[in-house]
Each structure stands twice: as structure tokens, then as C-alpha cells.
Image (tube, rainbow, N blue to C red):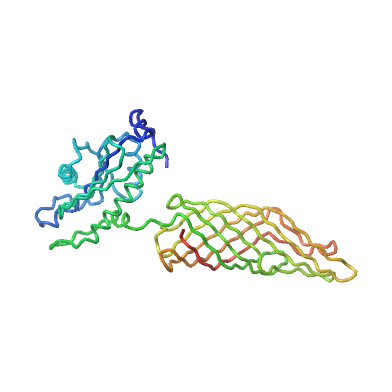
Amino acid sequence: MSLSSPRAPVRRAARGGSRLAWALALAWPSSVLAATAAPPAESDAVARVAVLGSRDAAVVQQLDAELALLGFEVVHAEAPTRPDHVALGERARELQVVAALWVDARGQDLDLWVVDRVTGKTTLRSLPLEPGDDGARIAAVRAIDLLRASFRELEQTPPPPGPKPSVPAPVRRAMRPPPPRFVLALGPAVCGAAGGLGAMAMAALAFEAWPHRRVGVGVRALAPIAGTRARAPEGSARVLPGWLGVGPRFRLTRGDRRAVVATGLHVGPALVGMIGEASPPFVGRRDLVATALLELDVGLSIALHPRLRLWLDAAMATAIPRVGVRIASHRVAAWGLPVGTGVLGVAVAL
């Protein structure tokens, strides 16, 4: 995610591991205390989060982007003169926001203040900042994770007597656990190709990395188990193809849903082994041919457990160039245009 460059004083603070203090004030609707105490615009402001501090700071810009991805409306305002939970609560109430994040360029730790306006409970959490160019990004991501944890704690706390406020959609999205970033899948596969060859049994192995919620990279490998056979009057040839592909992957649905649909485009080398069995007076021989394979797949994973999913995948591929199968100098079959595979296996979140 690209961000505009901050001004020099802020950049030096972020890269030099300067102190950053964060304050989070949870501003739950005042209607919990009394029906007449709720501000008129509260129903329109529950999906808003205030970011207090210099708007040009790299960590503030990164935090704006992370909050926008969760669906919050970001409101910028001046920071208080001191990290006091009373002042932060008043500022959050004035801005009519569900939470307020305060950034201060002092200190060497990241401090998170959680102020519950309903019960008056105040919690302070502290964690070290990572030095280097990625400090702003890491600080923003950790703050969002702590924001999720704060929302979950408030959800689990028994509410006081009175009407319970509705939780807005951005808050519900923030409370969801993030989808896994690394997935390993394996299972049996069936492969078929036009060109005179029958279906064959294969084993499929896939690894996926998801640095972004919707975009990732995948590695797929298929190896033959039984192979297929091409026949002619002079003999037969056992054909054993296998390939490895690498390429981008895209989630078509949210990664935290029970059923997740993803697609990908992979390219890589393919090896086709051939074992000849000749009728007299011909002599059989072995051969190994290399080619390139371009593959497009669509996969469906269904949650069986928080870390285990049922994996179904269908793919169509083409070999460039195709691989011909010859018996006694006669071409009896070809492999690679097109090649279809189907996989039924399991996927494990790492």
C-alpha cells in the first residue's frame, strides 16, 4: 500500500525509533446510560473513528488506510495537550465517534489507552515499536489488532441494565479474526487431456501466501500416480506428466467466510515422462520431454475447523509446445492442449 512521503521531521522520528504514544478512547453510544442523553447524530456517527495528531505523519497516513479498509469513516482533529483518559473521552464524545486514536511523537513505546465511557473502566496497554522504514506500517497494523481486541472485550463484558446499542457493521468487521496468511493444501487429483490420452490419477500440492486480504501468490505442483497409456500395433507407451506453477491468486469472496472462492493464474515447467513397451521386433525405450505450462484454476474451500478446510479445485491448462507421443516413428497421441484437472483434498491454515 503506497503512502505519500511525510515531512522530514516526522520521517526522522519514525525511522530513528522515536517515541510514539497512542491513545484509544472507546466512545460507545451514550444512550446506554439514558435514552435522553444520546446526541441527535449518534446513529450516524457510530461508524466513525477519530485520529488525533499530525495528519502528515507516516504512521497516521498508514492508520487512515487500515481503518478505511475496515469500513470506518476517519475523522481528523487536534490532539489533546496531555494523554489523559478524561480529556480523550470528552474529545471522542464531542466528535461523536466510536473510538479515538491519539498519536504523540514522544517516547519509545506504543501506548494504547482504552477508555470505556459506559463503565468508566480505563486500560493501558504498551508494546515496543519496530525500528526502520516499516515502523509506521507495523505500528498501524498492531494498533488495529489491539482495536479488534478492545471491541471483543467490550462485547464479552455484561452490559449494564438498559437498552443495548446496536453494533455497526465496521465494528463487526473489526471483531472478525483475520483470514490466514499462509495455506498449505494437498489431495488426490484426476487429470485428462485431449489428444488421444485417457484420464490419469495424480497428487496435488499447493501453497498460498496472502499478504493482502484479496491478493496473494500461489505455488502448485502435480505429480503422476498411475499415468495413462497410448497404444499402437507396434507397442504402447506409458505417459507420466507432472508440472510446477507459480503465479498470482485472487480471493473472490472474503477470506473469513465459511466458503471461500479463489482463482489464480500459474506458469511453470512441465515434464512428461514416457516409458515404451514394444512388440517384437521393435525395442521400447524411455524418454523425458520438457515443456512450459500455463494454468488457470478456480478453487473452493469450505471450513471444517478454524484451521482446516475442504479443498475443491478445477483447472484448465495448456502446454507450449505440446508433447507428442510416437511409436515406431508414428505420432499416436499428444499431451498438453488442453489439460484439465480436478482436485479434492484438504487445506490447512499455517
Residue 3 drawn at (x, y percent): 39, 38
Residue 59 drawn at (x, y percent): 34, 39
Total marks in image: 0
> Is residue 180 shown left or right of residue 61?
right
Q: Is residue 120 above or below residue 17?
A: below
Residue 279 drawn at (x, y percent): 86, 71
Residue pushed farthest top?
Answer: 8
Quarter of the image holding residue 275? bottom right
Residue pushed farthest right?
Answer: 281
> Is residue 279 shown left or right of residue 342?
right
Quarter of the image holding residue 34? bottom left
Q: Considering depth in this image, is 140 or 255 the residue closer to the camera?
A: 140
Q: Considering depth in this image, is 41 or 25 the residue closer to the camera?
A: 25
Residue 92 drawn at (x, y percent): 19, 45
Q: Considering depth in this image, is 305 or 314 the residue closer to the camera?
A: 305
Q: Which residue is at 78% across, 65% downward?
A: 332
Q: Which residue is at 61% across, 52% downward?
A: 267
> Is residue 232 shown left or right of residue 25?
right
Q: Quadrant of the N terminus?
A: top left
